[in-house]
Image (tube, rainbow, N blue to C red):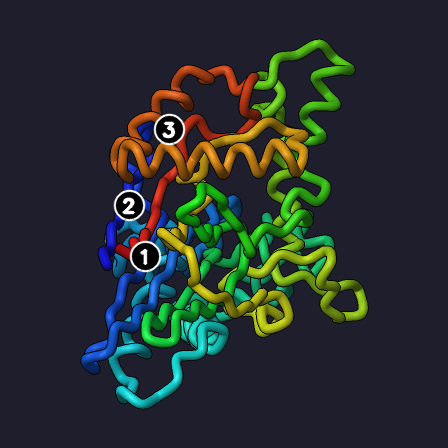
Amino acid sequence: MLLEIVCQGSPDQPHRYNEDAFVAYQRDDGQPRYVLAAIDGATSLVNFAPLHQYLQTERNGITPAGLAASVTRDALLAKLGAMTSNEDVDPRGLILHANHSLRELLEAVSHGIFDAESIKAVQPESVALLDDPRKIRLFLPAAVVTLATIDTTANLLRFAHAGDTALLICYEDGRVEVPTFEPRMSYESALVSASRAILQQGLSMLETINDPIIRALDRDHRIYHNYVDTEGATVQERGIGVVDGLPELADYIHTGLLGLEGVAAVMLASDGFMWPSGLHETPHERQHRYGRMWARLRQDGLRGYLQALRAEERADANRAKYPRFKLHDDATAVVWWSN
């Protein structure tokens, strides 16, 4: 058994804080048991002045997304370190613990960030943006996370997942299963709107994704983070789970239990590590892409794969082949090899 990790910031922004994080933890009880996590901070698009001040003076200028990712990582490690060897590791409970830890910090350092009226009182320029109180989600530092426990004695894997990080189960025979795939992640995507604009206006993808209207659509889709409707009820087919301090996360965590028979590797990855796809990928195309990823990883290893990924992204600098807002993203993968 072997653990391999890569966590690389975006190469086109070398001075920006890496907003990914990871956990690779082997329980210190003489048992071959592991806790792994891939964590990806969601870039904030709206600042809240008290939080910005805290980040500048107390956190060395870390971004809100970086804060959410690092608090999630540190909360997971602290909880694991405090557990006894006989305690059950509950992946869902760990994510909820991290979410609570982030909320406690935000309430302490940026009082009012969970209330639209308080935000407007601090910065009146946000009044128009906060036409819907649910849009406090635009101000909250957020991170997505996939967490897995591996018990090699029982040959079992348990996972909990919120957002667009991924768990890939890679088999000796070349198959790949991704139990964390959620089609709703593309719900009303701003990129879909951008593709329609291209057809209607004859613009390039690069021109379209920089259009203020498309950018505003991308910003406002943050309302689906731990989404509630106008009555305050969660709607699981519409919402996206994120660690942002909101209690509704509890309704958006996806969990599962899997056997490890025939598994060659388990990989947890941020979306920036995944091989990019076209905008309207079919299920067959998606499965083929996963298979090619796994074949390249087996052949070239983590770093060889990442080098090829970066070259592929650079070759598509105009975003025509793989529509996306960033040329490169932070890329993180934690891989457990069975042998």
Of residues 3 and 314, the one nearer the viewer is 3
Instruction: Quote the CA–CA distance across marks 1 and 2.
Output: 8 Å
Question: Is 129 rendered above or below residue 232?
Answer: above
Q: What amino acid is labelled 2 in the image?
A: Cys
Measuring 66% from the left and 42% from the top, which residue is drawn there?
Answer: 186
Question: Horizontally, is 294 left or right of 184 in the view?
Answer: left
Q: Height in image: 253 above or below 86?
A: above
Per the image, the residue denoted by label 2 is 7
Which residue is identified by label 3? 309
Residue behind mark 1: 22
Q: Nearer the viewer, mark 3 or mark 1?
A: 3
Look at 45% across and 59% down and name the residue there.
Answer: 146
Q: Which amino acid lies under the numbered mark 1 shown in the image of this protein? A: Phe
| Picture quadrant of residue 297 | top left
Q: Position of residue 77 (x, y in %)?
A: 29, 71
Residue 86 x, y percent position in the rendering: 31, 90
Is residue 257 visible to us here? yes
Q: Residues within 10 Å of mark 3 (few under 14, many from 20)?
A: many
**Which one is in front, 124 or 41?**
41
**SS category of the residue bearing label 2:** strand
Q: Amino acid at mark 3?
A: Leu
> Which comes sooner in the sequence, label 3 or label 2?
2
In this view, which residue lies farthest toward the top? 202
The quarter of the picture where residue 133 lies is bottom right
Q: Judge the density around disc 1: few (<14), some (14-19), many (≥20) Cα neighbours within 10 Å.
A: many
* Left or right of 311 in this view: 127: right
